[in-house]
Image (cartoon, grey):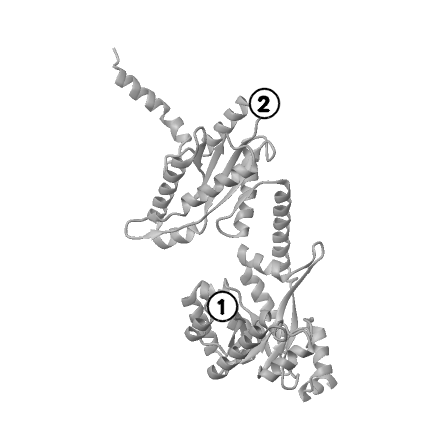
Amino acid sequence: MMKSAEIAFLTVGQNEPQAMAYTDPLTGLGNRNRMRDKVLQISAERASDPAPFTIGIVNLDSFKPINDLFGSTAGDEILCQVAHRLRACIPDGALVTRHDGDEFAFVLPLIFERASAEKFGQMIREVLSAPYDLGDRNVRLSASLGFSIYPFAGEDCEELLKSAETALYRSKRRGRGQITVYSREIAQEMKRATQLEQALRNAIISDAIDVHFQPIVSLSNNQVVGFEALARWNDPDLGFVSPGVFVPLAEERGFIDALSEALLRKAAEAALSWPRELFLSFNLSSAQLMDPGTSSSILSILGRVGFDPHRLELEITETAVMSSADTAHRIIADLRAAGVRISLDDFGTGQSSLGRLRDFIFDKIKIDRAFVSRINSDRASEHIIKAILTMCEGLELEVVAEGIEDYAEAVKLRTLGCGMGQGYHFGRPADGIATLRFLHENYYDPTMAERASA
């Protein structure tokens, strides 16, 4: 006769393949199959009275860099700690599962509406924000969440998961630690975002993003000294798309390098037709200042076009510098060694501008529009600009005031000793042909006259 222990062992052995098919091997949580069965079970129980229930997805923010920095063993330990925390705080009758990578999911039978889902999400966000113990160090992570509610966001597991993923995608686009509950409006918003992303990819591939130029002038005589290159996109279907929309999107989706390289090439080619003493100002993104290959890429483009690096000024923001200070320092040093000048844009709006002036070598400071626009109406703004000008004089830095829109602002800045200005008062951004026309009408250069008559 077979003993009970032997019977139990055989039963476990027979069920082991099935258990493995429903279990995440790393954390011991259920997997996607287990979640699907739970949703089917709830749906069947409520077939006669389809009361709502909720599915949620949580994703760790910036888990991959932590995993890359400390190794996969540390990454696995974090995931196991996440699983332990989630298992400990879900309500009775709920299920938590692990799907791919650092993505976990919930089935919440007793959460019926948006407010409750958001409240649960806030609790999970707080639980996951506590430090993770890796033995010799602690690390902190934030988490983003997306929720979908049955039957409004879907009537089966796959539809509900897809809706929750759409909500999660929106959370990720809004920043770290965000919570979103799916709605039709959000679905439309994400659909438009996807369409915009695809249109931008196509525009970059087809070289359809244009470059316009805004004059920078000497305030002492209003003479043009250079132009800033600005990206412009007019899509056949979407119409005009603001660079404030498509440039961050290109950074977020990882194709800012391709966009920036195309724009720099176009800008440098156009600037070859200008008087040689005029400079070209061009913006670098934070992503480019994190890429060690940026300096060689820029210098390679200038070499192919035949544009003198001494005529190029690269504008960077303090936020971009702070993203990866060591790499940014090397990039700036390489470019300055080749003759490229570096300008700190939006000065005064960051959190440690003076420290950056000490740690980095810049050639020029651009005073942000936020101060310039109030120079004649706000004594504090006037004194801040005075202090910036005095400091830059001591550091032997050139200064450009951005966003000058009227004569009074220009006069005030000139009186205070600001060297250069830029804004609608002097000229709006224009394409390459209009910029050449502007130069012919407003800038005398014998070589341009000779080229025009040739």
Foreground of the two, 374 or 358:
374
Task: Left or right? Give the position of 241 relative to 325.
Answer: right
Q: Earlier in the sequence, mark 2 or mark 1?
A: 2
Residue 127 lies, in percent from the top left, at: 41, 43
Whether residue 274 is visible, yes or no, is: no
Q: Amino acid at mark 2?
A: Asp
Question: In this picture, is 81 found above or below 70?
Answer: above
Question: In this picture, is 353 found above or below 419?
Answer: above
Task: Left or right? Give the position of 22 relative to 147.
Answer: left
Question: In this picture, is 152 found above or below 425?
Answer: above
Residue 134 lies, in percent from the top left, at: 31, 49
The residue tagged with tag 1: helix, strand or loop? helix
Quadrant in the rendering for residue 79: top left
Q: Name the residue beneath numbered marker 1.
A: 318
Quadrant in the rendering for residue 414: bottom right
Q: Count the marks.
A: 2
Outermost residue, bottom side: 446
Whether residue 358 is visible, yes or no, is: yes
Quarter placement of the N terminus: top left
Q: Name the residue beneath numbered marker 2.
A: 49
Residue 190 lies, in percent from the top left, at: 61, 47
